[in-house]
Image (cartoon, helix red, strand yellow):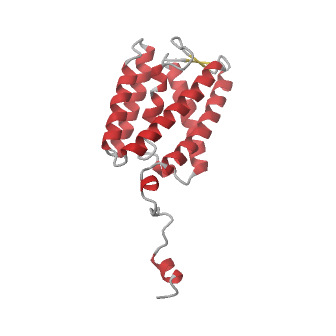
Amino acid sequence: MGVLIRVIAYNLVWVACVWGAAKGNEWIGPLVALVTVAGHIGASQHRLSESKLIALLAVIGLVIDSALMHAGILQFIDAGFLVPLWFAALWPAFATLLNTALTWLRGRTLLAVVFGAIGGPLAYYSGAKLGALQLNENLWLALTVIAIEWAAVTPLAIWLAHRRDGKAVSEPNHVDSTDAPDASSRVALEGGR
């Protein structure tokens, strides 16, 4: 699967989850997420490491967003102890982007922080506007807390993905192209040969 297809697939998951929840069809989003994640893993050259990354991000997201729910930042009609399945399904779908569409954020921690601090609150606010969830009545507090969440999680997720991209895990002698010396540096390192 190409990067564009993965980005489109993720956006379809987001719409299916949010729209489905807003319309009382909470099962639609998790189903679309399951198909998207399965397709991503099936197309991956490093299925095991990609599966572990997706599972790890799903747990991280479930824990963080459930904590925000218990703190009153996020509110759901159909919530139990954890955030609803439709909301939790967004995290594994997001994880499918880490070693594909979001690789450009590797090594750019500040950019990842800014990307997360803007994108996270925008997504949650959009979901609330569509009626899928409610944010704390102090909207600025809610958006600030969500911005902090995503400003921390985005660079962490990018770092975890880079560590688990299949290459670094399965190939001990793997050299990232950004770490490899160019031809003139190699000549200098080898003593001018």
Image coordinates of residue 97 in percent, x first then y, are 43, 41
Residue closest to the eye, 168 or 122: 168
Q: Is residue 151 above or below residue 73?
A: below
- Callout count: 0
Residue closest to the eye, 6 or 187: 187
Image coordinates of residue 30 in percent, x first then y, are 40, 23
**Residue placed at 52% from the left, 46% from the top?**
160
Tell me if 91 is positioned left or right of 137 in this view: left
Q: Is residue 182 above or below residue 15?
A: below
Image coordinates of residue 66 in percent, x first then y, are 58, 23
Image coordinates of residue 193 in percent, x first then y, are 46, 88
**Residue placed at 49% from the left, 32% from the top?**
58
**Residue placed at 43% from the left, 47% from the top?**
99
Residue closest to the eye, 152 or 63: 63
Tell me if 116 is positioned left or right of 11 in this view: right
**Residue placed at 41% from the left, 39% from the top?**
51
Q: Quadrant of the N terminus?
A: top left
Residue 70 quadrant: top right
Tell me if 118 is positioned left or right of 141 in this view: left
Q: Is residue 30 above or below residue 160?
A: above
